[in-house]
Amino acid sequence: MVKPLTWWSSLAHHAHAAMSPVSCAWWERQLAFQRVAEWVPPRWPDPAYPQQLRLDIRVDDADRAERELRALGAIRVLGEHESGFRVFTDPVGHPFCIVFGGKNTR
Protein backbone atom coordinates (compact mmCIF):
# COMPACT_ATOMS: atom_id res chain seq x y z
CA MET A 1 0.00 0.00 0.00
CA VAL A 2 1.21 3.51 -0.81
CA LYS A 3 1.27 5.65 2.35
CA PRO A 4 -0.91 8.78 2.03
CA LEU A 5 2.05 10.92 3.11
CA THR A 6 3.59 11.87 -0.22
CA TRP A 7 6.67 13.93 -0.90
CA TRP A 8 4.60 16.76 -2.36
CA SER A 9 2.29 16.87 0.68
CA SER A 10 5.36 16.96 2.94
CA LEU A 11 6.82 19.85 0.94
CA ALA A 12 3.56 21.76 1.30
CA HIS A 13 3.59 21.10 5.06
CA HIS A 14 7.18 22.41 5.34
CA ALA A 15 6.62 25.30 2.91
CA HIS A 16 9.15 27.68 4.48
CA ALA A 17 11.81 25.18 5.55
CA ALA A 18 15.15 24.82 3.75
CA MET A 19 14.91 21.01 4.08
CA SER A 20 11.72 18.94 4.05
CA PRO A 21 12.03 15.40 5.46
CA VAL A 22 9.53 12.67 4.60
CA SER A 23 9.11 9.96 7.23
CA CYS A 24 6.43 8.46 9.41
CA ALA A 25 8.64 7.93 12.47
CA TRP A 26 12.08 9.06 13.63
CA TRP A 27 13.54 5.54 13.46
CA GLU A 28 12.53 4.96 9.83
CA ARG A 29 14.66 5.93 6.86
CA GLN A 30 14.03 9.47 5.78
CA LEU A 31 14.02 11.11 2.41
CA ALA A 32 14.65 14.86 2.49
CA PHE A 33 14.18 17.52 -0.16
CA GLN A 34 16.12 20.77 -0.31
CA ARG A 35 14.65 23.99 -1.66
CA VAL A 36 16.40 26.03 -4.36
CA ALA A 37 16.02 29.77 -5.00
CA GLU A 38 15.49 29.65 -8.78
CA TRP A 39 13.72 26.38 -9.38
CA VAL A 40 12.60 25.51 -12.91
CA PRO A 41 10.02 22.70 -13.12
CA PRO A 42 11.01 19.65 -15.14
CA ARG A 43 9.29 18.89 -18.44
CA TRP A 44 10.49 15.33 -18.59
CA PRO A 45 11.47 13.82 -20.99
CA ASP A 46 12.45 17.19 -22.57
CA PRO A 47 16.27 17.39 -22.11
CA ALA A 48 16.12 21.20 -21.94
CA TYR A 49 14.16 20.81 -18.66
CA PRO A 50 15.54 17.52 -17.26
CA GLN A 51 14.43 15.47 -14.28
CA GLN A 52 15.90 16.62 -10.99
CA LEU A 53 15.67 13.40 -9.04
CA ARG A 54 15.04 9.75 -9.61
CA LEU A 55 12.96 7.64 -7.29
CA ASP A 56 11.99 3.99 -7.73
CA ILE A 57 9.50 2.52 -5.27
CA ARG A 58 9.11 -1.28 -4.99
CA VAL A 59 5.49 -2.40 -4.59
CA ASP A 60 3.83 -5.80 -4.15
CA ASP A 61 0.67 -5.01 -6.16
CA ALA A 62 1.28 -2.68 -9.12
CA ASP A 63 -2.38 -2.21 -10.02
CA ARG A 64 -3.34 -1.25 -6.47
CA ALA A 65 -0.31 1.05 -6.16
CA GLU A 66 -1.23 2.74 -9.44
CA ARG A 67 -4.80 3.37 -8.29
CA GLU A 68 -3.57 4.84 -5.00
CA LEU A 69 -0.91 6.99 -6.65
CA ARG A 70 -3.35 8.36 -9.20
CA ALA A 71 -5.81 9.17 -6.41
CA LEU A 72 -3.01 11.20 -4.77
CA GLY A 73 -2.33 13.19 -7.96
CA ALA A 74 0.31 11.15 -9.78
CA ILE A 75 0.07 10.98 -13.59
CA ARG A 76 0.91 7.77 -15.48
CA VAL A 77 3.44 8.14 -18.30
CA LEU A 78 2.99 5.24 -20.69
CA GLY A 79 6.14 3.69 -22.10
CA GLU A 80 6.71 1.41 -25.05
CA HIS A 81 8.63 -1.40 -23.35
CA GLU A 82 7.47 -1.46 -19.73
CA SER A 83 8.30 -4.71 -17.99
CA GLY A 84 8.44 -4.82 -14.21
CA PHE A 85 8.02 -1.05 -13.78
CA ARG A 86 5.57 1.78 -14.46
CA VAL A 87 6.52 5.44 -14.84
CA PHE A 88 4.58 8.32 -13.26
CA THR A 89 5.07 12.01 -12.63
CA ASP A 90 4.15 13.84 -9.45
CA PRO A 91 1.90 16.93 -9.70
CA VAL A 92 4.81 19.23 -10.69
CA GLY A 93 6.36 16.85 -13.21
CA HIS A 94 9.07 14.88 -11.37
CA PRO A 95 9.18 11.37 -12.83
CA PHE A 96 9.28 8.30 -10.59
CA CYS A 97 8.69 4.59 -11.03
CA ILE A 98 6.94 1.83 -9.22
CA VAL A 99 8.89 -1.42 -9.55
CA PHE A 100 7.35 -4.85 -9.15
CA GLY A 101 8.01 -8.49 -9.87
CA GLY A 102 11.43 -10.11 -9.58
CA LYS A 103 14.32 -8.21 -8.05
CA ASN A 104 16.15 -7.91 -11.41
CA THR A 105 13.30 -6.41 -13.45
CA ARG A 106 14.80 -2.92 -13.75
Image (spheres, helix red, strand yellow):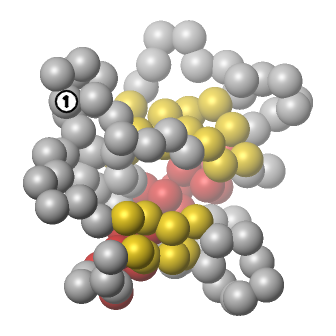
Q: Is residue 54 above or below residue 57?
A: above
**Lateral position of residue 66 relative to residue 28, left or right:** left
- Position of the N terminus by quadrant: bottom right
- Front residue of 101 and 94: 94
User: Does residue 100 appear anywhere in the picture?
Assistant: yes
**Res 91 quadrant in image:** bottom left
> Label 1: few (<14), some or many (≥20) within 10 Å?
few
Locate residue 64, reporting x and y percent: 64, 55
Residue at 45% from the left image edge and 19% from the top image edge: 79
Residue at 29% from the left image edge and 65% from the top image edge: 35
- Front residue of 3 and 16: 16
**Res 99 quadrant in image:** top right
According to the image, label 1 marks what residue?
49
User: Does residue 71 appear anywhere in the picture?
Assistant: no
Q: Is residue 81 above or below residue 25?
A: above
Q: How many marks?
A: 1
Looking at the rendered structure, the secondary structure element under dot 1 is loop
Locate residue 74, reporting x and y percent: 38, 53
**Lateral position of residue 58 relative to residue 41, left or right:** right
Q: Is residue 85 above or below residue 36?
A: above
Q: Is residue 67 above or below residue 95?
A: below
- Position of the C terminus by quadrant: top right
- Residue placed furthest toward the top: 81
**Lateral position of residue 45 relative to residue 49, left or right:** right
- Front residue of 23 and 85: 23
Amino acid carrying label 1: it is Tyr
- Front residue of 37 and 45: 37
**Res 47 quadrant in image:** top left
Residue at 63% from the left image edge and 31% from the top image edge: 85
**Lateral position of residue 33 relative to residue 106, left or right:** left
Locate residue 67, reporting x and y percent: 52, 56
